Image: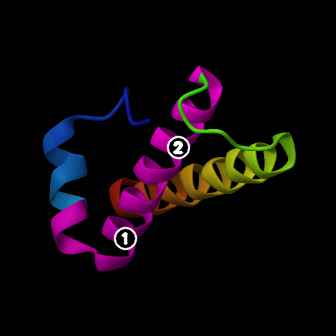
Amino acid sequence: MFEEQSQPEIDALIKANPEFRQLYQHHKKLDKKVMDAELGVLPIDDTTLARMKREKLAAKDRLVRMYDTQHH
């Protein structure tokens, strides 16, 4: 998700900001569920999968905004 940013900066933000940490963990959990659903490991209907993808994207957008606020 943060391929362009250094991992130590992300780790520092995770430690320092509880909201960022919670949202980051939520995004990772959604990412795993979406991946499992797409691989057929997690049986899930298309509507739920689409909702999870939107929620994951919204979390990512919020995380990027929070990161940018801290580093610019």
Q: Is 35 located above or below residue 69 in the figure? A: above
Dot 1 falls on a residue whose secondary structure is: helix
Q: Is residue 37 magenta?
A: yes
Residue that lies at the very extreme toward the right in this rendered image: 47
Considering the whole magenta stretch, tell me its main secondary structure: helix
Please report the bounds of the magenta region as a residue range. Answer: 14-39
Q: If the image is split into quadrants, where does the N terminus sit?
A: top left
Name the quadrant containing residue 15.
bottom left
Crowding around mark 2 (Cα neighbors within 10 Å: few <14, some 14 to 19, many 20+) is some
Q: Is 27 located above or below residue 21 in the figure? A: above
Which residue matches tag 2? 33
The residue shown at (48%, 57%) is 63
Task: Kindly report the distance in space between the C-alpha atoms of the residues bearing marks 2 and 1.
Answer: 17 Å
Dot 2 falls on a residue whose secondary structure is: helix
Nearest to viewer (mark 2 / mark 1): 2
Residue 40 placed where, x, y %?
A: 61, 25
Which residue matches tag 1? 22
Q: Is residue 31 magenta?
A: yes
Q: Amino acid at mark 2?
A: Lys
